[in-house]
Image (tube, grey):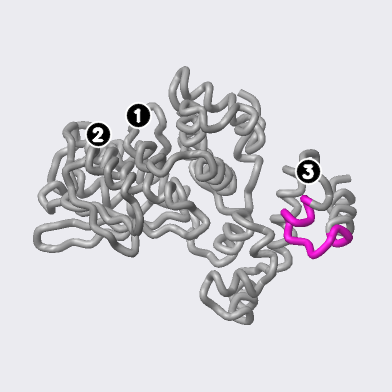
Amino acid sequence: MRGNPLQIEHTGTTVAFIAVVDLARQLLQRRLVSAVQLADVDAALPEWVAALQQQGADRHWLYRTLPEEYLLQLWQLADNLGGPCLGLELGAEVNRAAQGVLAYRVERSDTLGAALEVFAQHIALMNPAERWQIDHSDSTVTLLLHCPEVYPRMARERSVVALQAWASDLCGSELQPLAWFFPWQDGQTQCQWLADYSSADWVRSSGYGLCFAREVLSLQLTSADAYLSAVLDREIQALAKPQHSLNARVLSLLASDLSRFSQAQAVAQQLAMSRASLYRQLKREGFQFRQLLDQQRQQQWRQWRHRVDAISMAERLGFADVSGLYKAQKRWQAAEH
């Protein structure tokens, strides 16, 4: 395999290597994307997908990461080309050959309840943008997904259905939720798919999630391994880094849409804070907004400079005009020599 994903980005938000490659595999198998389109995301991505299809996930991939923007680019392609039920269909597919360190650790839990706790606690190992809230009552356990708006609806639908499919696979039997939570307003097609897939009711809500009977938490996992769990917990702890630092959240927004978030005011508004607070908290972490903006612009410029014209590049990078791009290019090119 050529390419080293660890060298692509060190400063912005990253996601699990396997999360990107497996989504690319799913889209390619459904002929929603071509190998050429995957190569536009990363030149080595088609090769990684082929390796996953032929031999499963390489153990060296367990701890690898890729820039979050790769995942967002794939979801943008899927959102443009896929049908209304694509996210649900993708989530229902369990690929045991595609495991990152999070899935590998979760499988070693002794019960489903413990597995869900580990999953929610360490979801940032797969995608820091996701957060799972677990609410317990006397008779139920409800899992609610929180995910930023830069991810399309189908991405969230996939995550919810994938959690049910994955939990069923871990337990070796189909686990039917008591209810699904989706914010569909006109979701007749999705409702029909869900009715065919599951006997559980769909509840219209403001968010995404599902609810199980509380007793599923005590179901035993056949893959439980206390020794491996302890070993992996130590490795995960060593890998752990602050996932909620402001600079990482700012970089995530910039990576998702530079043209929208090139202005500090837009970022501050998205993060529900004042521009002064944004500057102050970034300074406390040792960063400046213009530094993060320039860093993300330079990274995307390197990725796109041979593919788009100057006007398109200026728009993509959030410059007011082409002259601003030319000035920045001179500085970036000088830094390369």
Q: Do the residues labelled 1 and 2 touch (CB within 8 Å)?
A: yes
Apparent side of residue 298 relative to residue 251 in the rendered image (left or right): right
Q: Position of residue 163 (x, y in %)?
A: 30, 44
Distance between mark 1 and mark 2 Cα atoms: 9 Å
Give amino acid for label 3.
Answer: Val
Q: Reading the chain from its start, which is encountered first: label 1 or label 2?
A: 1
Which is nearer the eye, 279 or 264?
264
User: In the image, which residues are magenta?
Assistant: 312-324
Cα distance between the residues tagged 3 and 2:
44 Å
Q: Is mark 2 on a helix, strand or loop?
A: helix
Prevailing secondary structure class for the magenta stretch in the rendered image: helix
Residue 205 position (above or below residue 227): below
Residue 137 vs 299, above or below: the answer is below
Mark 2 closeness class: few <14, some 14–19, many ≥20 residues within 10 Å? some
Q: Mark 2 points at which residue?
A: 169
What x and y, as percent, mark residue 266? 62, 71
Q: In which quarter of the image is the C terminus?
A: top right
* Residue with the mark numbered 1: 96
Q: Which secondary structure lies at badge 3? A: loop
Spatial CA distance of label 3 from label 1 is: 38 Å
- Residue drawn at point x = 39 percent, y = 37 percent: 90
